[in-house]
Amino acid sequence: MTTRSNLHTHCTYCDGNDSMQDMVQAAIDAGLTSIGFSSHYPTQYDFDDVQMDIGKLDAYFEELESLKQQYKSSIAIYKGMELECRVLGEGRPVIDNRCDYTIGSCHYIRNNSQFFCIDYLPSMIDDALISFGSAKKLIEDYYQEYISFAKEVPFDIIGHVDIYAKLNENMHYFDPDAKWYTDMTIDYIDEIAKTGKIFEVNTGAMSKGYRTEPYPARFILQRLHEKKVPVTISSDSHSTKTITFAFDMAEELLRSVGFKTQLQFNGSTFEAVAL
C-alpha cells in the first residue's frame, strides 16, 4: 500500500462512531502521514440525520487546530468539510474559510420539492424510484444536480460520484452494464470533469458490505484515465477500524485501468504520488 493519507473521514461531530482524537491515533497506527476530517456540512434540514449541528462548527475547527498542534510531530491534520449539494432554502453551501480543503457530495436528490436519500436504506431507494418513475430518470436528475453543484461551488474533490449505485449490487434496480446507462454516465462524467475537480476513489461502501469494488465503477475510472482526470483514494471512514480499508484494492484497481499516480494533499496543494 502506497497511500499514506485519507481526506474523507468522519467523527462524532457528525455521524462518525469515534472521537476525532481516536481517529487521529488510528491513522498514526495505520502508518498514515496525514489525515483530513470531512464532517458533514450543516444542511439544517430536519430530515438530514448525518449533518453536523451548526452550533458545533466553532468547536469542530477549534479541536482540529488543537489536535494539529498536539500531533504535529507524528501526523499532519487537515481541516475539511463534506458539503451537501443543497442546504436549507434551496441554496448551495458556502465554504467555511477555515477549511483546508472540501469534498462535494450529493446524498439526497429532489423531485417535486421532496428530498430522497439515495445511499442509506433499500426502502428509501424504493421511495425514490417510485417518485422518479424509473432508475434512469433518478440517475439523470442526480447527475444534472451534481453538474450544477460542481460548477457553482469551488470545492476540491468529487465525492463518491456514483453513490446512487451503493445498494444496487444487492437490489439490482438497474443494469450497470446496460448501454443506456454507461453511455449516459460517461456523458455526465465528462461534464463534471470539465470543472477541474479531483475525483475520489472511495472504499466506504466496501467497508459496510454494500459493494465489492470502490466508487466509482471501473468503466468510469477508465474514462477518467482517458481524459487525464486526477483521482485520490479515501475510505470515507466512520470508525477507527476503517481508516485505510481496502486501500490496497483501490490502488490495484487504479493501476489496472492505467493510472500511475494519485493526488494527495500536502497542506497547501494537491501533489501527484506514485501508486
Image (cartoon, rainbow, N blue to C red):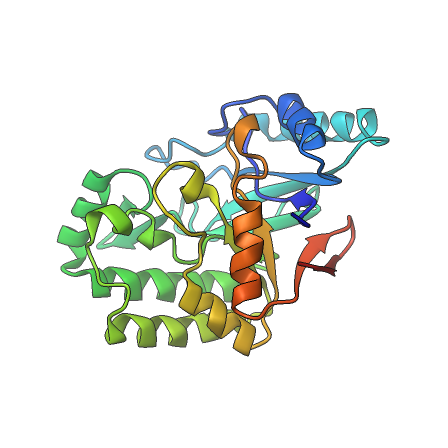
Name the spot of residue 207 as percent of width and height, x first: 44, 38
Q: Quadrant of residue 196?
A: bottom right
The vertical placement of 36 against 201, above or below, is: above
Residue located 57% across and 43% down the image: 8
In which quadrant of the rendered image does the C terminus lie? bottom right
Q: Quadrant of residue 142?
A: bottom left
Name the spot of residue 50 as percent of width and height, x first: 42, 33
Horizontal side of 123 relative to 39 (left or right) equals left
Q: Which of 4 and 37 is in front in this view?
A: 4
Name the spot of residue 48 as percent of width and height, x first: 37, 35
Horizontal side of 66 relative to 253 (left or right) equals right
Q: Is residue 94 at least partly visible in the picture?
A: no
Residue most extreme to the right: 73
Q: Is residue 227 at least partly visible in the picture?
A: yes
Residue located 55% across and 72% down the image: 225
Q: Nearer the viewer, residue 87 or 233?
A: 233
Name the spot of residue 152 as percent of width and height, x first: 52, 63
Residue located 49% across and 23% down the image: 17
Residue located 39% across and 36% down the image: 208
The vertical placement of 120 against 219, above or below, is: above
The vertical placement of 8 against 60, above or below, is: below
